[in-house]
Image: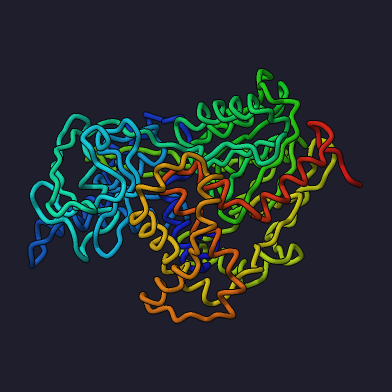
Amino acid sequence: MKYLKTPLIITFSLIIGLLAGNLIARRADMSVIAKIGKSHSKIDELLQYADQNYVDTLDVQELTEEIMTDFVSKLDPHSAYIPLEDLEIVNSELTGSFSGIGVQFNIQNDTIMIISVISGGPSQKVGLMAGDRIVTVNDSAFTGKTINNEKVMHTLRGPKGTDVKIGVKRNGTPEILEYTITRGDIPVKSVDIAYMVTPETGLIRISKFGETTYSEFLNALASLRNSGAERYIIDLRENTGGYMDQAINMANEFLPAGKLIVYSEGKSYPRFEARANGIGSFQQVPLVVLIDEFSASASEIFAGAMQDNDRGLIVGRRSFGKGLVQQQLPFSDGSAIRLTVARYYTPAGRCIQKPYEMGKGEEYEMDLINRYTHGEFINQDSIQIADSTHYQTTNGRTVYGGGGITPDVFVPRDTAGYTPYLMQVTNYAYTYQFAFRYTDKHREELNKIKTWQEMQTYLDKQDLLSQFVAFAAEKGIKPNRQEIAISEKWLKKSIQAYIIRNILDDEGFYPVFFQDDTMVLEAIRTVESLHGNIIEPTN
């Protein structure tokens, strides 16, 4: 389960995610682009001298790419150069759709395993099925050690209307089945789940802030209200951000007219203020926002707007601390730069960007590990904020600047079931791999079950734990009965959740995975304690 990854692995994944999904301003200054196109610098002269006069032949294009990457890395931790070949994939993380064949996949044993086929997508139309293994693409073998996620995406994605021929191995069928698939638009979802956690409380989990997040969010709110929701939990854990306007629109749903949501400004970026227009449909509902150390940028805008306006309580752990605004600017060859152009500030005037030094990206990346080793994820008193400046919310509550949003209600990481055995099988993704293999073997009977409640009842009877321990032993993880007993609850829950996801997608995964989740339970208690839509000072 992803909450059990080691800090180093999590930090690396987060930085990559932030580069792909930074807080992006929508206002493009075309005069800046024009100036860039006309500029001529010593770098241009250097490349020209080297190309014309160097003793050996140079690949000037490759040198240029390296210079671009190195130059931008010296600016700040969140400016990024995006080569042309990566731009489509990076942008598709935030756009409402991309063009592809419409499958979710995982690479196991050097083979592409289809986890699910997107309903109504190109692959479903030609007959691809969950559990199929892709072994050839355009009549060439497509397996082995060189296969990785980036290579698969580059190969299977492509312009809408173009064809790709794939060969798959399917359980029970000896021959390779061949399909020609015409690529089409594949929706990118940012609201993972919206469901009732109690008869009166609805939870909405948002994974990123993309082009369609606000419309998805409105649909989720309406669905929960129709299901009887009177209180709401917005789960922004591990949400690394995205488009600022989507966070602003979401905040507008909960705030009365005139309330400041966020403001931003920079050297060449005039002050911009976003205020609520008063037409939001959920201004009166009790609200709690969940954040953790991986909640960044647009997530922090939303959480900061709710906290500073005393509109909702923030539950969890101190957020990432990204208060820089990026603007994407194109180059003539189709590549782009996401350049930091401004800082943003919460309504109380907080810049929540944590400290950084230009050119010291490695130090910056170590921040989460330092916070972990210092004990911040376990003990609220261990929180150290570089800038201890105090700010006041609308109703006079004290909040803090200097690196992230500090929650109103702190919830430590749940380590009750942690053991070395659990960490091993989780970090090697063996729980996930076992769940896929089990699903593959029992797909026919699992497909007959239509709700996560029924499936969990069915799986409770299957003795999954002993089967998993045998599977992990095959992989080289020696059983430790004492540690397995301590971690039994975690193991069972994650295995069941992954199996259910393989059949019912996130609609079944999160209600199981969040059972006994300490943050969700605290959020429920907190939102049920609220007696209105305004948070009053406690002192």
| Residue 466 locus on image (x, y percent) | 48, 70
Residue 314 visible to the viewer? yes
Residue 48 visible to the viewer? no
Please tell me whether residue 382 is drawn above or below residue 355 in the rendered image.
below
| Residue 232 locus on image (x, y percent) | 68, 35
Image-quadrant location for residue 327? top left
Can you name the residue that lies furthest to the right here?
A: 539
| Residue 92 locus on image (x, y percent) | 35, 39
Which residue sits at x=22%, y=51%? Answer: 170
| Residue 21 locus on image (x, y percent) | 44, 45
Judge from the rendering whether residue 485 lies leftward or rightward of residue 407; answer left or right.
Answer: left
Image-quadrant location for residue 32? top left
Which residue sits at x=17%, y=53%? Answer: 61
Q: Could you tell me how many numbered marks the image carries?
A: 0
Which residue sits at x=34%, y=37%? Answer: 118
Please tell me whether residue 133 is drawn above or below residue 373 in the rendered image.
above
